[in-house]
Image: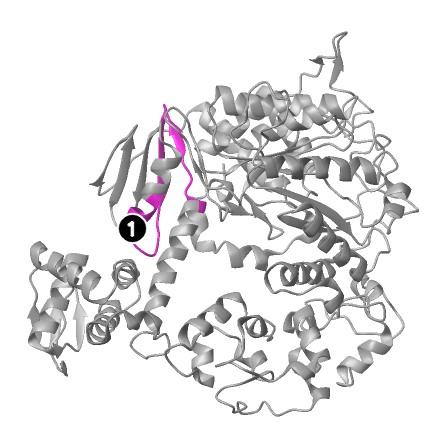
Amino acid sequence: MLRKQSCPHTLDENFHIVYTDSMDVFDKLKILTDAAKYDAACTSSGVNRSAPEGGIGNATSCGICHTFAGDGRCISLLKILMSNVCVYDCKYCVNRKSNDTPRATFTPKEIADLTINFYRRNYIEGLFLSSGVLSSPTRTVELMTEALRILREEYKFYGYIHAKAIPGADKEAIALLGSYADRMSVNIELPSEASLSSLAPDKSKVSILEPMGFIKNAITTGGKELMLPKKPKHFAPAGQSTQMIIGATPETDLKIMRLSEGLYNRYSLKRVFYSAYVPVVDSSSLPALDTPPPLLREHRLYQADWLLRYYGFTADELLDEASPQFSRFVDPKCGWAIAHPEFFPVEVNTAPYEMLLRVPGIGVKSAKRIVQVRRHTKITYEGLRQLGAVVKRARFFVTCNGKLPEGARVGQNALPALLTDASVTAKKRSVQLSLFDPADPDLETGVSAEEVVKCLTGQM
Amino acid sequence: MPDGSDVVYRYDGTFDGFLCCVFESVYSRTTPADIVAEDTLLPMREIATDTEKAARVANGIKTKIHVGVYEMVEVGFRSNVPHKELLLLKYLLLGFQVGAKVLNMLTHEDVAPVPYLKKKVYDETHRMKEFVRFSDYDGTLVSVIEPKHDVLELIAPHFSDRLRGETFMIYDEGRGKAYVYDKGQCGYIFIDRLELPAASDQEREFRRLWKLFFDTVEIQSRHNERCQTNHLPKFYRKNMTEFKRL
């Protein structure tokens, strides 16, 4: 039951929003949650804060996931659009102007009321607010800011707020929005300028990177030199993040990882989110409507993203022009270890921390424990297991007191089969791996039939 | 040094009572076969709880071993792991022997199980901060929880900070105790059975809205119940609004 292009509001002569729709909050929430759910950002992390006298709310820097949806994703914030009316026509987006879908718009007070009442009941840590573009990016940001202002100044809310900056909005508008928010983000959307101009011509590379640069500077200076009515206490203290859609366009994993690396280095982002493309509109420039989302590819990208941020890897170490896609069968860290036998085996009792981190099966926590314990005791194979390392994987890459653990002396060729991700081989729907039929999007974008054969026979 | 012994210590189940068992073991130079809070058929020695003695032991742990060891034991004691008392006692006896070094001896058989207890308790503390759900009864927020480990005292400060201007209660149904907070005043009370009034229209409306949000925000093509259950075990869903039938 779709409404034909109904617009739930108009603008009066002063460009103030006049709500013409009498839809109740329940119906609005349904439409505007549905419209917001493809934005992958979900954390409430990055800030530690308590409310002062008269205030309500706090923030915990590790983030708090209040519940988990049926798709397994964490829910920590009330994630909604202010409005799914949009003047843009981005081809991949369910809210694009030319799409026939029910439209709704929250008033700023409705947003603030929902947030504070959910918050009091401990359903959420705070608000994640984005929006379709109403008349202009700047006007949209101003309306979003009003919702945040009510929360912060009238309801004295000190919980978490993540606000999306709309590409193309004025700096002043973004500055005011950021002074109320904990985290801000501008979505990169697609991993290349070419894809962006083909699928989202209303958003240009400049209109996205410019606010990112502006936000980065404002965060660094704490918003002190911004022209704001009141000097803010801080500016987006939980930093900036972004998101890109994976699988809608043909960029390789290498290109995506180089882009992420550049964004982390140049814009000091806290997180890059990768969102597996879920077809919601029919278009000749996009994958078919029945294409399942490339979840394994998204998983590999997150694994690689962690390697960049916590394990000291660079994008060019993990992939190169000859193999620009991550393996379906082994995770990126294992892939690197297999391809670089010259660095192994690593002696756990003497190797530097940075090298311990590169051993498959040894994570950040285990590596820190190893360093802590080996000051007092020699670590044995059994000790390594007790410290939390996944010895089943690590045994091929380490020595303990110069000795290789039992069963670890294997040929280089056997390693891939022994280190294959168990979850990849044990797929629920038993697909006969055909050499000729790339029905699975992960196979399509990743590995060639030849590589599949090589991997299974241990030749890779 | 403490010898093995066939005696089982019986105590009152409280942390102070446990510290008195530690006192007994150290000064009698014996390690009991077990420490229990109920009757057994084995030869038992009744250990009385003396808060002064307990305080001396606590102080001794902090000064002679390490403050971190005290935290490990105090938190680990809240777990529901069987024979936790004996595990913690052996850990402490080793600690009195070698001092602060015991914190790093993670591969020693008397040390290895202990951080695991602390982890279980802190993990549940974090989960309770996530899964506690309040209902508004005429301005007072009430939550019912059933944690496996005794974490009420550990989550109380978080909620006092978060809801500082509010009036609320968190009731641990399994243990019959509740934390009550009223705009800065707080304390613990014991309640056998909690009877709550019917929810107001407004309260029911917000529950309905939350359930709607929860059901809608899922991306159907990514449905993954196993992933959801890994993060949110079914055990915790009993008191969570979004999983109740309204």
Between A369 and A200, the one lying in front of the other is: A369
Residue at point 35%, 52% (across, down)? B147
Q: Please tell me how crowded label 1 is: few (under 14), some (14-19), or many (20+) other residues with Cα within 10 Å.
A: some
Q: Residue furthest top?
A: A13
A169 lies left or right of A399: right
What span is colored magenta in the figure? B130-155
Q: Is any atom of residue A18 visible in this view?
A: yes
Q: Residue at x 19, y 72 (%)?
A: B96
Residue at coordinates 73% horizontally, 63% vertically from top-left? A315
- Picture coordinates of residue A362 (x, y %)? 54, 73
Which type of secondary structure does the marked residue at label 1 adopt? loop
Q: Is residue A411 magenta?
A: no
Residue at image point 69% right, 51% down: A265
Q: Is residue B106 above or below residue A258?
A: below
The subunit letter for the residue under badge 1 reads B
Q: How many marks?
A: 1
Amino acid on which the number 1 mark rests in the picture = Gly
Residue A114, image x, y percentages: 54, 27
A236 versus A42 height, above or below: above
User: Could you tell me residue A157's position as x and y percent?
Assistant: 48, 28
Q: Answer with the quarter of the image where residue B141 lies.
A: top left
**Residue A310 occupies which quadrant of the picture?**
bottom right
Question: Seen in the image, is A15 located left or right of residue B110?
Answer: right
Q: Which residue is mark 1?
A: B174
Q: Which of the two residues, A54 or A264, is positioned nearer the viewer here? A: A264
Query: Is B133 one of the magenta-colored residues?
Result: yes
Of residues A83 and A394, the one drawn nearer to the viewer in this rendering: A394
